Image: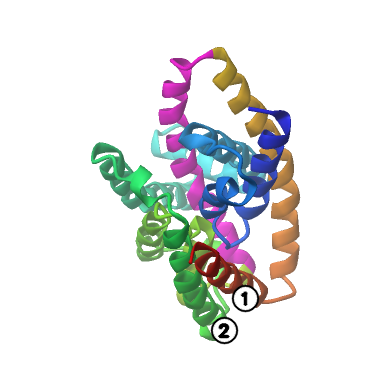
Amino acid sequence: MSILHLLIIAIVQGVTEFLPVSSSGHLILIPYFTGLPDQGLAIDVAVHVGTLAAILVYFARDVWALARGGLSMLGLANAKQESRWFLWIILGTLPAVIVGLAFKAFDITDYLRSAELVAGTLIFYGILLFIADRWGPKERKFEDLTLKDAVIVGLAQALALIPGTSRSGVTMTAARFLGFTRPEAARFSFLLSIPAIAGAGFLVGLDLMEAGAAQQKDAVIAGILTFAAAIAAMAFLMHWLRRASMTVFVVYRILLGIGILLWAA
């Protein structure tokens, strides 16, 4: 793959992963609108790993708290509250893991990479995001997290395996319905993504070890470029959500979905 191709993929992934507009949907659309070959799932997951690194850096304090929680569960630290957060994040990840393994076992993923499906999910979940953001209560923080919250948002995260849904979008939608403020919904969404993205990266990483050197090099370059774009996008989104609503992202999703349907027709 050319550097230009990898740069386009990295920018699209890095920017859209943290905005509630569906990074996987945009990645699928790249070949349709540019004429470039489909980058494939290996590169898709490699750039997701780049966004994972960005989360670990940007939310380093929260990540350390969760790490202390994990150590506490092993008896290596004393952090009862953090251990609950750690356990609930892990439990909230299980639905996506189960659905993801089912998709892989029955080879479903390739059948979901269509522009029409992306358009439909962009519009439908965009409307849900608008309803949650417009009428949902705005009072809770991540520190108020309960097991029920983790399970509900975790189930929502599993829906994001369908391209166009948007992992960050659907989890923020669920969190907003549960009463989390906009910035805290985003914080919850990003922290919940860590185990899911790490797991997907590990599985595809095993496949990449058996791939040729060229594909491995492309994956590494794409991941590094995505990390840079993701840090900038995350900082922008957190700044935006402290001062404005998610309506602009809803409008973008709906217009893009309609545009895709018209183009496909």
Which residues lie in the magenta part? 183-212
In the image shown, does 223 or 30 lie closer to the viewer?
Answer: 30
Relative image position of residue 43 (x, y in whole percent): 54, 33
Above/below status of 185 relative to 60: below
- Residue that numbered label 2 is attached to: 134
Left or right of 95? Residue 174 is: right
Q: Secondary structure at mark 1?
A: helix
- Residue that numbered label 1 is attached to: 251
Display coloring: rainbow
Left or right of 21? Residue 10 is: right
In the image shown, does 33 or 18 lie closer to the viewer?
Answer: 33
Residue located at (47% from left, 36% from top): 41
Residue located at (73% from left, 67% from top): 240
Q: Which one is in front in this view, the residue at disc 1 or the one at disc 2?
A: 1
Relative image position of residue 109 (x, y in whole percent): 35, 44
Q: Is residue 59 visible?
A: no
User: Is mark 1 in CB contact (under 8 Å) with mark 2?
Assistant: no
Query: Per the image, is 186 magenta?
Result: yes
Q: Main secondary structure of the magenta part?
A: helix
Query: Per the image, is 44 magenta?
Result: no
Residue located at (48% from left, 67% from top): 265
Q: Secondary structure at mark 2?
A: helix
Q: Amino acid at mark 2?
A: Arg
Left or right of 101? Residue 136 is: right
